[in-house]
Image: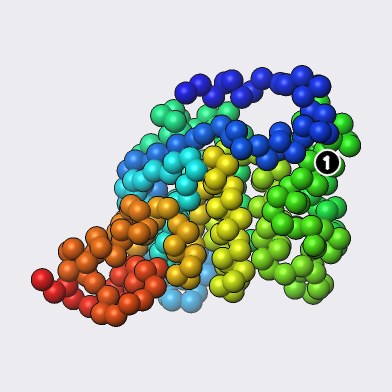
Amino acid sequence: MDFNGGDQTPNRSDHSPDHLPSLISSSNCFPITLKFVDVCYKVKIDNKSQYRDCLFGHKDKPGQEEQERTILHGITGMASSGEILAILGPSGSGKSTLLNALAGRLNRKHQGTVRANGRALTKTVLRRTGFVPQDDVLYPHLTVRETLVFCALLRLPRTLSKKEKVSAAESVISELGLHKCKNTIIGNTFVRGVSGGERKRVSIAHEVLMNPSLLILDEPTSGLDSTAAHRLLSTLGSLALKGKTIVTSIHQPSSQVYQMLDSVLVLCDGRCLYFGKGSEAINYFGSIGFAPAFPMNPADFLLDLANGMSPFPTF
């Protein structure tokens, strides 16, 4: 597929307020199929320290100042349009590093290939990619509406008028279910504001405002209870139904959240334990002798396997 067709600037008349909601949240999303093959990533660790000799009384041997550590070991997978790919694994397993590699945000070049619709990640593809980091970076004293209007004024094309950009922000507020708290300030640790789930939806709204075809999220359910996490995944599911490709990392999903996932990739120490449909994970591990002793949340079972807490296989 050719990505260049989406870069043509539409006519001014196409951006009228009546057509703006369909422009921002249109179901006719440009489909992107993301494939990554043998993705490896290594970092160099500098062991030199000016206080090392004083504290430990020894010096590094020549040539041992830098060591190389492998974060990802040949990860392969695929995320299709209209589906949610969830990356599971314990802390330190490489989930955030893999998401940054898929979004083209790594400082160092990784090995392996990451392709969208069979092509490399060009600037055109990256402009169609939205990235939601784990930590919400929002102005605590602005309301939800002021935050999204400010974002719309900065990020939407100059061909749109101020009234049209405000209308775009209003349509995203309605789409993500933020209309009840749109006049509430964001808040932070010291200032009371919206809830954690609402704050996370505001961060997602930042990217949805640009109508991305690929949306990558780093642990959007962290710090949320099971009900808020389920509502957030329901929002992502509604975006996926409009043709968007959703890739997200989830630390410990509930059974309800797990059932909403189309594909699952399980990481352990930077290695892939499983990639496939979430509904088939239990049967796969059962076929090789790893089966839960009693009915349990599939996500908990997969995390137990990744942490090495599963029983020995019985054939």
Q: Is residue 265 visible?
A: no
Out of 65 and 213, give the one closest to the viewer.
213
Q: Is residue 237 above or below residue 25?
A: below
Out of 284 and 113, give the one closest to the viewer.
284
Out of 202 and 28, give the one closest to the viewer.
28
Q: Quadrant of residue 287?
A: bottom left
Residue 298, horizontal then vertical, whole percent: 37, 69
The colour scheme used to paint the residues is rainbow
Q: Is residue 112 visible?
A: yes
Q: Dot 1: few (<14), some (14–19), or many (≥20) neighbours within 10 Å?
A: many
Q: Circle 1 sits in a helix, a strand or a loop, which is it?
A: helix
Which residue appears at 55% of the width and 56% of the height?
A: 218
Residue 303 horizontal side relative to residue 145, left or right: left
Which residue appears at 71% of the width and 36% of the height?
A: 22
Which residue appears at 71% of the width and 63% of the height?
A: 198
Q: Which residue is mark 1?
A: 167
Residue 303 horizontal side relative to residue 282, left or right: right
Out of 117 and 42, give the one closest to the viewer.
117
Residue 297, horizontal then vertical, whole percent: 39, 73
- Tag 1: residue type? Ser
Which residue appears at 34% of the width and 46% of the height?
A: 76
User: Which residue is at the far right?
Assistant: 163
User: Which residue is at the far front?
Assistant: 18
Residue 305, horizontal then vertical, whole percent: 30, 70
Residue 161, horizontal then vertical, whole percent: 87, 31
